[in-house]
Image: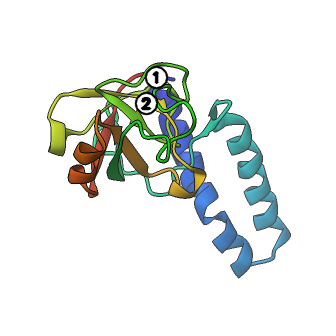
Amino acid sequence: MSIKHLIILLVLGAFISISPVLESKTQSNENSLIISSFQEMSESLATIEKNSLLPVSSLFISNPDNPSIKVIITAYSSSPWQTDSTPFVTAAGTEVRDGIIANNLLAFGTKVKIPELYGNKIFIVEDRMHYTKGYYHVDIWFPSYDQALNFGAKTTYIEILES
């Protein structure tokens, strides 16, 4: 997906995120028609991958070439009680390894940087999280439970690179 397409989705997503507020404050047919049209367009444009949507209500763009998103970052390891019955296989069907992250917002294969924590190291989205974690949560894979636990939870920005 190109940056141009991402920005179009960002604009549509931002409007969609306020549409319930607009709809509740006014019941005019004109506003409802506008909201309905944008919702239909966003549904057709926002699908990036069969299991990934791009709801962008809290997206922050610092640089059009590398959009940044404010996220909560935690960590996980290959423990069956943290994942599923195949703890060493990602949702994308690859084997876990250094640099793999789980996220529900971005498409598989999307490359990101976490500059405040890891400088220029590139991470790749190849796993998913439980849906209750939402879209603005990133899990970094670690080889051991202790390493994941010691990482803790942090709030920072990720830079989205071309996928």
Which of the marked residues, 2 or 1, is nearer the chain's N terminus? Answer: 1
Give the residue at x 59% y 56%.
15
Q: Position of residue 52 (x, y in %)?
A: 60, 37
Please report contact status of discs 2 and 1: CB closer than 8 Å, yes or no. yes
Instruction: Report the front residue among 23 and 85.
Output: 85
Q: Is residue 150 above or below residue 21?
A: above
Give the residue at x 43% y 26%.
110
For the C terminus, the image quarter is top left
In the rendered structure, the answer to whether residue 20 lies left or right of residue 61 reads: right
Q: How many marks?
A: 2
Q: Is residue 47 above or below residue 134?
A: above
Circle 2 SS class: strand
Can you name the residue that lies furthest to the bottom here? 25
Instruction: Report the front residue among 145 and 50.
Output: 145
Q: Position of residue 2 (x, y in %)?
A: 47, 23
Among the 4 quarters of the image, the one containing residue 97: top left
- Specify the label residue 125 is tagged with: 2
Residue type pointed to by label 1: Gly
In the rendered structure, the answer to whether residue 151 lies left or right of residue 46 reads: left
Instruction: Report the front residue among 29 and 118.
Output: 118
In the rendered structure, the answer to whether residue 110 lies left or right of residue 27 reads: left
Can you name the residue that lies furthest to the right here? 29
Give the residue at x 17% y 43%.
117
Color encoding of the figure: rainbow
- Specify the label residue 109 is tagged with: 1
Residue type pointed to by label 2: Val
Q: Disc 2 and disc 1: Cα gap in Å?
A: 5 Å
Q: Position of residue 12 (x, y in %)?
A: 59, 47
Among the 4 quarters of the image, the one containing residue 63: top left
Give the residue at x 22% y 50%.
151
Q: Position of residue 109 (x, y in %)?
A: 46, 22
